[in-house]
Amino acid sequence: MRVIVVGAGVLGTLHAWHAIERGHEVLHLEREAEARGASVRNFGQIWISGRAGGEELATALRARELWEGIGARVPALGFRAIGSLTVVRNDTERAVAEAATRRPDAAARGYRLLDAEEARALNPALRGEFTGALWCERDAAVEPRTAQRALKEELLASGRYTYLGGREVREVSGERAVRDDHGDTHHGDAVVLCTGAWLGGLVRELAPDLPVRRVRLQMMQTDPLGEPLTTSVADADSFRYYPAYRGDALDALNDGQAQTPTAAAHKMQLLMVQRADGQLTIGDTHEYATPFAFDTVEEPYAHLTGVVETLLGRPLPRIRRRWAGVYAQCTDTARVVHRQQVRDGVWLVTGPGGRGMTCSPAIAERTADDLGW
């Protein structure tokens, strides 16, 4: 079988991976020279801790298993089973963490409630002010800026993978064929469109009522910390944005403890992970109303700097990069992904939202299973 994959972000790359693994030939088309969207602008977190139960958690756990196996084969992916600590500062926040440990699926996530001393034993860089943390053992990380390149090199080694960058697909022409902006038509046995947040043009023509929206965020990256940050770190504001923490304790947090004005205005949480070279990736904000601003604003960065310095008990290293990014999210946020047949033999797979890096291996595996690859 010859599979055409359109889009070389993490979701498209993992679709190519599963097709190659099953013995097929892949032609991979990307409108940029290489991925430039959400797949390289994220935290690189394999984030199990905040996922909803049921299908979403099952998908994330399966993806975590797949990421570990891929990471063993592709060391340059930078897979690290580092876990995460969501720190709490008071009894109200601690109650949300404690409620999470009573979930029926808490053991599958590796949840454990720690006091401050136990949290610092896991992550000695956290020398600042907090009273405890929710530990999630199953969380992990990869290197988002280089992951697609590393996976592509492994795919090329198969001898059955062809990558064409700088090719924007303009048309689905005939059965299981696409035409690119160079005028070339590519024929295959199956076509999978993994176009990320590119929801106009061809995608709008194929799926005019697509139940997917775009979300914008701001993030930053520092100079090297100078010491290991041995886990990912989140703050209690993240409880407000992840479905795993919903319940009476979270209601009490929302009713009794407001976010700072900046955090509320920008729908913020702290997520922080250390890159392989020691730098810290820190974020983030959420913006849902379009048209999005074209510039970044300083207040969220100042807020995040203050939160991180409180937790580290030291000044943050110099910020060396700031950026914004846009990702695609199903309008029904309970759905893991939107998968739709848009023509005979042509499928559109998009909208995993903030779960893209976490869940892509399992999403792609499900596509391969459903299409009988």
Image (spheres, rainbow, N blue to C red):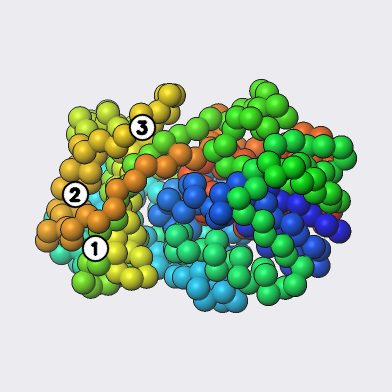
| Residue 271 percent coordinates (x, y) | 33, 51
Which numbered disc, 2 or 1, marks the residue that appears first in the sequence?
Answer: 1
In this rendering, is residue 305 above or below 74? above
For label 3, count other residues whose C-alpha is less than 10 Å away and answer few (under 14), some (14-19) or many (20+): few
Left or right: 9 as drawn, with respect to 292: right
Determine the residue positioned at 34% across, 60% down: 273
Determine the residue positioned at 12% across, 58% down: 315
Q: Quadrant of residue 34 in the image? A: bottom right
Looking at this view, is 8 or 270 the one in front?
8
Residue 289 appears in the rendering: yes
Find numbered disc 3 in the image and state the secondary structure of the residue it sits on. Answer: loop
Residue 305's disc number: 2
Which numbered disc, 3 or 1, marks the residue that appears first in the sequence?
Answer: 1
Residue 59 appears in the rendering: no
In this rendering, is residue 110 above or below 270? below
> What amino acid is at disc 2?
Thr
Q: Which residue is mark 3?
A: 294
Looking at this view, is 54 or 9 the one in front?
9
| Residue 123 percent coordinates (x, y) | 27, 68
For label 1, count other residues whose C-alpha is less than 10 Å away and answer few (under 14), some (14-19) or many (20+): some
Left or right: 285 as drawn, with respect to 8: left
Residue 223's disc number: 1
Determine the residue positioned at 54% across, 64% down: 149
Mark 2–mark 1 Cα distance, whole angstroms, equals 13 Å
Find numbered disc 1 in the image and state the secondary structure of the residue it sits on. Answer: strand
Determine the residue positioned at 65% across, 48% down: 167
> What amino acid is at disc 3?
Phe
